[in-house]
Image: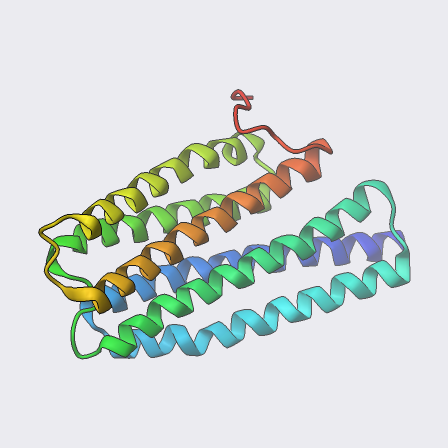
Amino acid sequence: MRDSFHEELDAIQATLVTLGGMVSVAMVRSTEALLNADIKLAEGVISDDEKIDTIQHDLESRAINLMARQQPVAQDLRILVTSLRMSADLERMGDLCHHIAKLARMRYPNVSVPAELISTIEAMGKTAVKIIEKSTHVVKTQDLQAAIELETDDDEMDKLHRALFVALLDDSWSHGVETAIDMTLLGRYYERCADHAVSIARRVYFLVKGEYASESQPAL
């Protein structure tokens, strides 16, 4: 009975890793669709978000069912509770990729991003992918050093986010209010995606240590 229980716990962790991989792909594709006005890629991301939602809902049902049947305590209970929360983070990250793709579709056939902001948005997309992949690695390996490093990685995204706002508030901005709103929302999508990835890393740290790492946590 206990062997079966732990096999189910392992399957839930494997599903989280699968979701992380799907979100990483969605981020790559949605950014590419945005910067290249690629309607086919945008539609693919929008469609695939339903798959992420379905997998997350199934994971949630399995975890709750397992809690009801096995009534786990201590570490096993922590695994299930953190898994539920991490799956919600991943589902939300998928939604944010979906939003990026929808913006690309809404402005098609035009490129959504003004020429002078393309390098910033491209950097935000690459940073988001790096953070998503590292958070997935943390889930898979419980690498606490990588979990702590994600706080610093997120600082890189915050700097890019601030740089985007500096450009939007500059007196030389000539693209109007509508594009400014688009870019404000876009920056928020990338920034929030990174925040969710950091949240996942913090939950893994809690799972292993039984406490949350402080933001000033030293390297292990």
User: Which sits in the foreground, 125 or 110?
Assistant: 110
**Image colouring:** rainbow
Q: Measured along the vertical axis of the image, is residue 119 above or below residue 65?
A: above
Q: Position of residue 45 (x, y in %)?
A: 39, 72
Residue shown at 55%/63% (left/top)?
Answer: 91
Displayed quadrant of residue 182: bottom left
Displayed quadrant of residue 176: bottom left
Q: Is 208 displayed left or right of 170 in the figure?
A: right
User: Which sits in the foreground, 68 or 111?
Assistant: 111
Q: Position of residue 97 (x, y in %)?
A: 40, 64
Residue shown at 47%/64% (left/top)?
Answer: 94
Q: Is 1 displayed left or right of 190 in the figure?
A: right
Image quarter hosting the C terminus: top right
Confirm whether residue 13 shows in the render.
no
Confirm whether residue 14 shows in the render.
yes
Q: Position of residue 189 (x, y in %)?
A: 39, 58
Q: Is 5 displayed left or right of 170 in the figure?
A: right
User: Which sits in the foreground, 203 or 5?
Assistant: 203
Q: Measured along the vertical axis of the image, is residue 84 above or below residue 36?
A: above
Residue shown at 57%/35% (left/top)?
Answer: 143
Q: Position of residue 89 (x, y in %)?
A: 56, 56
